[in-house]
Image (spheres, rainbow, N blue to C red):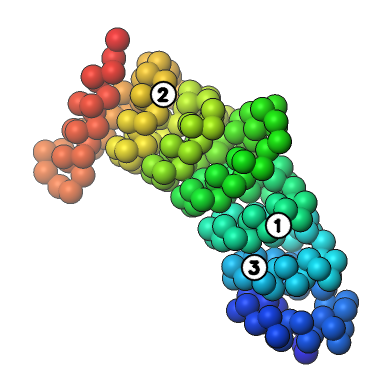
């Protein structure tokens, strides 16, 4: 079986084809494609736990990284492949592996709204020290996983991360708290969870000297009196002001 065909079979979850291929050519298990992705990367992308299990049983390197630093766990976490995430974690996948942009698997699952995967990654941390380190980890812009969830309006993930102890008012490299990012794109559900958790964020200025309230007021001006975003903008600004002490 040619390598390209093997990668396709892994992605498509064709267990019989993969079993035959690696039996005939064991070196295929570790053979990377042009992007340095292995069969395990492709199986993780496709969400095939049986194929991933077969590859791990054939001694696939669970923490092999592609040219951007993505491991199979990054791929499965971003894609919401919870069964594969659990399988990889059980096989010793490194939940603290970083991409070239310094993203952990939790950053990727948080930004994509993969709440089930976020739960598995959080639960994989053996002790409170590890959990705190994972929740506080910054990507190349200083964004913690909660920043990514807030910026994308992923309410369920925001709830998971706050429940696990994520710092609601941590600042990124631009001084933005998660609330700044949620308010900027008018994610009402995420914003209200965040302000409930840390009302002091309302008065926190970022590097541009803007507070979340400033941004909310600016969105009201930007959207004017009519248009699809006018009502949500006003609603969010009004609701945030009820938390001002």
Query: In the rendered image, which residue does mark 3 sit on?
Result: 49
Q: Position of residue 19 (x, y in %)?
A: 76, 82
Q: Secondary structure at mark 1?
A: helix
Sooner in the amino-acid sequence: mark 2 or mark 3: 3
Q: Which quadrant is the C terminus positioned in?
A: top left
Image quadrant of residue 209?
Answer: top left
Query: Residues under labels 2 and 3: Cα distance?
Result: 37 Å
Q: Can you say which quadrant of the picture contains the N terminus?
A: bottom right
Answer whether labels 2 and 3 touch (C-beta < 8 Å).
no
Indicate whether 215 appears above or below 105: above
* C-alpha gap between disc 2 and disc 1: 32 Å
Closer to the chain start, of discs 1 and 3, is 3
SS for dot 3: helix
**Depth order, front residue of 193/224:** 193
| Residue 68 in sight | no
Mark 2 and mark 1 residues within 8 Å of each other at the beta carbon: no
Residue 5, quarter of picture? bottom right
The residue pinned by badge 1 equals: 88
Residue 33 on image: x %, y %: 76, 73
Lower sequence index among marks 2 and 1:
1
Q: Which residue is mark 2?
A: 197
Eye-nearest disc, 2 or 1: 1
Residue at figure coordinates x 57%, y 57% from the top left: 82
């Amino acid at each position: 079986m040619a390598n390209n065909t093997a990668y396709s079979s892994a992605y498509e979850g064709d267990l019989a084809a993969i079993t035959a291929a690696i039996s005939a050519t064991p070196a295929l298990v570790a053979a990377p494609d042009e992007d340095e992705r292995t069969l395990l990367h492709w199986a993780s992308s496709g969400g095939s736990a049986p194929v991933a299990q077969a590859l791990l049983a054939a001694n696939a390197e669970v923490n092999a990284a592609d040219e951007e630093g993505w491991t199979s766990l990054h791929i499965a976490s971003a894609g919401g492949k919870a069964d594969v995430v659990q399988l990889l974690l059980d096989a010793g996948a490194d939940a603290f592996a970083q991409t070239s942009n310094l993203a952990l698997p939790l950053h990727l699952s948080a930004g994509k709204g993969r709440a089930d995967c976020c739960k598995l990654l959080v639960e994989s941390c053996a002790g409170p020290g590890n959990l705190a380190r994972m929740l506080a980890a910054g990507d190349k812009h200083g964004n913690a996983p909660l920043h990514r969830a807030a910026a994308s309006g992923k309410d369920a993930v925001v709830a998971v991360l706050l429940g696990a102890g994520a710092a609601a008012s941590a600042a990124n490299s631009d001084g933005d708290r998660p609330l700044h990012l949620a308010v900027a794109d008018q994610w009402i559900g995420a914003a209200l969870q965040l302000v409930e958790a840390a009302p002091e964020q309302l008065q926190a200025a970022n590097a541009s000297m803007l507070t979340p309230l400033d941004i909310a007021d600016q969105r009201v001006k930007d959207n004017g009196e009519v248009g699809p975003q006018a009502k949500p903008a006003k609603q969010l600004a009004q609701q945030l002001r009820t938390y001002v002490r």
